Image: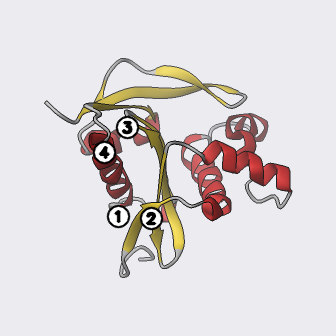
């Protein structure tokens, strides 16, 4: 299996990671969360990530700007980025793991590093808006549904279902 063998490294995101991270987000979001959408609607939800493979400077800058968050970690295997997590003190904003690396502990390692970082900043709980695809993953690592399913806007796309979730870090 492709994911077996060598070590997974979880590290801070660096500016030069933007191109690889943009492609990872575009591909993963499309495959696992937007597959049911028409190409036109999918592009609306992807926003600048629809141009992840573009060499146009304005596209690359827009993607780098969206990736930017107070906390961004990447998971790397053999020098290749296979996962990314974006967030801030008490909110996990997004988590993407390349499909061929699902169920190998990468998402869990990214979230654990994020939780440790949040505790260090004094956070007592983390909130997130999980796509329906990812709810079982988050439940398996201790997150609970906090309300019923809702719909969100993602860039120019509207109506994507999500599940609000949270995890108490300190009791």
Q: Residue at x 38, y 71 (%)?
A: 8
**C-alpha distance separating marks 3 and 2:** 18 Å
The answer to the question of whether label 3 and label 4 lie on touching residues, with beta carbons closer than 8 A, is no
- The kind of secondary structure element at disc 2 is helix
Q: Residues within 10 Å of mark 3 (few under 14, many from 20)?
A: some
- The kind of secondary structure element at disc 4 is helix
What residue is pinned by disc 1?
A: 104
**Tag nearer the camera, 2 or 4:** 4
Mark with earlier residue (3, 2): 2
The answer to the question of whether label 1 and label 2 lie on touching residues, with beta carbons closer than 8 A, is yes
Q: Quadrant of the N terminus?
A: bottom left
What residue is pinned by disc 2?
A: 101
**Residue 151: x %, y % from top left:** 54, 21
Q: Quadrant of the C terminus?
A: top left
**C-alpha distance separating marks 3 and 4:** 17 Å
Q: Residues within 10 Å of mark 4 (few under 14, many from 20)?
A: many
Q: Does any portion of residue 51 appear in the rendered image? A: no
- The kind of secondary structure element at disc 1 is loop
What residue is pinned by disc 4?
A: 115
Mark with earlier residue (3, 1): 1
**C-alpha distance separating marks 2 and 4:** 21 Å
**C-alpha distance separating marks 3 and 1:** 17 Å
Colour scheme employed for the rendering of this structure: secondary structure
**C-alpha distance separating marks 1 and 2:** 6 Å
Quarter of image, res 163: top left
Relative to 131, is 35 on the left or the right? right
Q: Residues within 10 Å of mark 2 (few under 14, many from 20)?
A: some
What residue is pinned by disc 3?
A: 135
**Tag nearer the camera, 3 or 4:** 4
């Amino acid at each position: 299996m492709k994911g077996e063998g060598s070590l997974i490294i979880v590290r801070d995101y660096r500016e030069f990671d933007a191109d690889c991270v943009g492609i990872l987000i575009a591909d993963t979001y499309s495959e696992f969360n937007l597959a049911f959408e028409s190409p036109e609607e999918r592009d609306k939800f992807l926003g600048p990530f629809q141009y992840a493979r573009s060499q146009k400077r304005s596209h690359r800058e827009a993607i780098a700007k969206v990736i930017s968050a107070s906390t961004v970690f990447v998971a790397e295997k053999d020098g290749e980025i296979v996962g990314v997590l974006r967030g801030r003190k008490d909110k996990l904003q997004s988590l993407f793991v390349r499909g061929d690396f699902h169920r190998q502990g990468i998402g869990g390692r990214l979230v654990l590093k994020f939780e440790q970082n949040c505790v260090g900043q004094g956070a007592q709980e983390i909130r997130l808006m999980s796509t329906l695809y990812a709810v079982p993953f988050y439940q398996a690592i201790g997150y609970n549904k906090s309300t019923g399913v809702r719909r969100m806007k993602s860039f120019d796309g509207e109506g994507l279902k999500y599940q609000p979730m949270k995890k108490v870090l300190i009791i």
